[in-house]
Each structure stands twice: as C-alpha cells, then as structure tokens.
Image: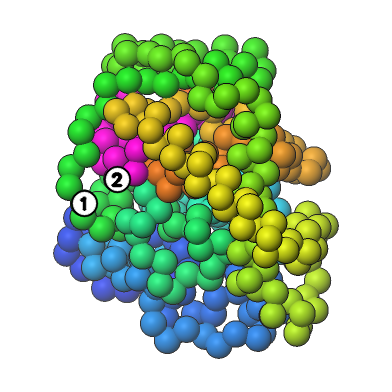
Amino acid sequence: MIPWLSLAPGGPCVPGPLAGLSFAAKDVIDVAGLPTGAGHPLWLETHPVPDRDAAVVTRLREAGATFAGKTHTDELAYSLAGTNHHYGSPRNPAAPGHLTGGSSSGSASAVASGLADIGLGTDTAGSCRVPAAFTGLYGLRPTHSRVPRTGCVPLAPSFDVPGAITRTPDVLRRAAEALLDPRPEHPAPTWLLLPDDLWHPVPAQLRAALRPSLDALRRLLRTDRTPLFRGPDAWRAAVAAHTTVQGSEAWAAHGDWITRESPEFGPGVAARLDRASKITSAEAARARAALADTAALLRARLRDTVLVVPTAPMTPPPLTAPGDRSRLLPYACLAPIAGAPALSLPAGTLDGLPVALSLIGPPDSDERLLALAEALRDAA
C-alpha cells in the first residue's frame, strides 16, 4: 500500500467536463464507505465511517471525475510541513529528499506522481498552496464562501475552504468550475501589486529565480509597488491575529476530543494545540477585531488588483529539517484573512528545486486568477 494514497476501486465513467480525469481526496474529506482519519490513528478509531460523500466529492463525481483514493495529511491538518508523527512524509517527486509541504501533502504527492489528475485538499493557512509550490504544481485556494465545506473535518472554519491541486492550469480551471458556486463575473484586474514591504524580506536568490515569471506578469498588467501595510509591525500583528483566531477555532473544533481521548501528536502540532488550549475568549475577540481591520485593508487594495507574492519565501526544506512555519505564514495567511482566492503557480527553480508565485485577487475573482494563470502559461 502506498502510504500517501489509499487506492479505491475504479467506478463507472460518468459523462461530464471532467470525464477521463481522476481525483484523490485529502483524508479530512469524507468519501462514503471509506474511513476519514484526519491524519491521526486515534481519530480513525473513534469516528464512524461516513455514509455519504463530502459535497466537494459529489461535485467532482457529478462532473465526471473518477475517485482514485484517499491521501495523507498532517495531523488534524494543523501544519504546513507535510510531515506526520504517525505516518511519515509523502514522497516529493519534484524534489526527492525534500518535504512536500502540507497539510494537503498526500494530494500534492499523488498528483505530482501521476497517480491522480486532481488533488482535492483543504486550505486554512496555505495547506493547498504550499504543497503545490513545493511539488511544482498549481494550487487554488478559492474564495472562502464559494465552495461548500460539508463533509470536511474542520480546523478553523473562519478560514477553511476546500481547494484543488493539479499539474496544469487548464485542469485546475475545469476542476474549479465544478467546485465553485456560481457568482456574477468579476471585472478583469488592471493592476499588479508587488508591494515593497512584502518583497523586501525575500532572499535575493529567490527573487532572481522568480524574476522571469514576474516579468511575464508585468507585460500583462500595470505594476504598483506601494507597500501593503503601514510598517512591518502592522504585518506582524496581522499574522499574530490570524494565528490566534486559527488556534482558538482549532481548539473549539477539537478540544473536547483531545481532552477525552488524550491523543499523541508530533512536536509541532502538539505545541500549537497546547497554545490553542490557553487562548482566552478575550484574546480571541481582540484578534478577530484586528483581523477585521486587516481584511478591510486587503479588500480595498485588491479591488481591481492582483497581489503577487512568493507562495513560500524558500525552496522545499530537506526531509531531515523541520518545516519553518514562521516564514511561510506571513505570506500564506493574507488570502485567508481577506476571504480571498489565491492561486499558486510554478515559477521556475532555484538550485534545482521548485519555486512558486501566488496570485491573490479580490473575493469572487477566482475565474480571473485562473484565466491569468493560463495567459501566463501561454506567454511563456
């Protein structure tokens, strides 16, 4: 058995726009008749086998895609590393010996390995986009309210959204068309925002590796380099507020189960859950108020603009190195705070390892981001 993909028997081919394509589902997403383990063996033991598909699984099946299997995830999806204390780390075909990123780690690995065309995952703070970046794939975090979460194990519902990972932008667009609730068409963007404050900390070598893709984007849209935040303290405060709200909601979702069952977690997840258990309601309320201000700022700046940042300010770390969550979150949390769509796309290599850019647009501009990714691919 492949540890990051539990294969399922093939089902009948249903006509539809995704006919001929297969999908693999992260193990926080229910598939009728198969257990949902949420990345933890004790969760597997203490929860019943679901008798119905998650809404996103139903949508992909109805569009004609064939279910390939359930995939590995970090424990309770509360990690960006792609590691799991109980089950290990999936293989990264794009960077052997390096982490896949998480927590949709197995979905990215399955797609990068050619075992599925679509990796169905969830994204709370980068969990589709980081593994897509580390495995050289395309990854979409949709607008927060545009994809149903029914049948998905929650982490932090204010930020959770199902997403997809694919090898090509056209397959990602077709998968998104099946997953997204319809909304009025959003105006095409006219500006590309490359804010100096967000790009200044990016290592020079990484900026150089990303430059050809950035130049291609600049040929498509006008560029604005105005800082996004009112000083570095404001950016750090936004990241801290997101972390507090996420932790508060994670404990609300799983604290009773953790207290009752005493599950063992790996060091990173255990530390985050321990901190989450100590967040007071007053601290969470202050963090929510701060996030509301940041969300308003982001949405105002994104009105006719695509914000472009590195998906990860680093290449995939070696398997022997711990994932550096503190470096990933400042970029990965921006779209969740705004409830906005974000699309990670491959943007070259550095020392032979994949690097990626994220396009972040205003809420409901998912289709515009997907079109921009295809235009960028065609311009290459």
Instruction: Classify 240 as above or below 35.
Output: above
Camera-side residue of 83 and 309: 309
**Is tag 1's residue or tag 2's residue first in the polypeptide sequence?**
1
User: Residue 91 placed where, x, y %?
Assistant: 63, 49
Characterize the local packing of mark 1: few (<14), some (14-19) or many (20 or more) Cα atoms within 10 angstroms: few
Residue on which disc 2 sits: 364
Q: Determine the secondary structure under disc 2.
A: loop
Distance (Cα) linking label 1 and label 2: 7 Å
* Amino acid type of the residue that numbered disc 1 sits on in the rendered structure: Arg
Give the number of the disc on residue 183. 1
Instruction: Classify 101 as above or below 215.
Output: below
| Magenta residue check for 74 | no
Q: Determine the secondary structure under disc 1.
A: loop
Q: Quadrant location of the C terminus?
A: top left
Which span is picked out in magenta? 354-380
User: Residue 252 placed where, x, y %?
Assistant: 63, 71
User: Residue 105 placed where, x, y %?
Assistant: 58, 52
Side of 281 where 131 appears, left or right: left
Q: Looking at the rendering, which quadrant does residue 1 occupy?
A: bottom right
The residue depicted at 39 percent of the width and 82 percent of the height is: 52
The residue depicted at 21 percent of the width and 55 percent of the height is: 182
Q: Looking at the rendering, which quadrant does residue 186 occupy?
A: top left
The residue depicted at 72 percent of the width and 39 percent of the height is: 326
Residues at marks 1 and 2 touching, judged by CB atoms closer than 8 Å = yes
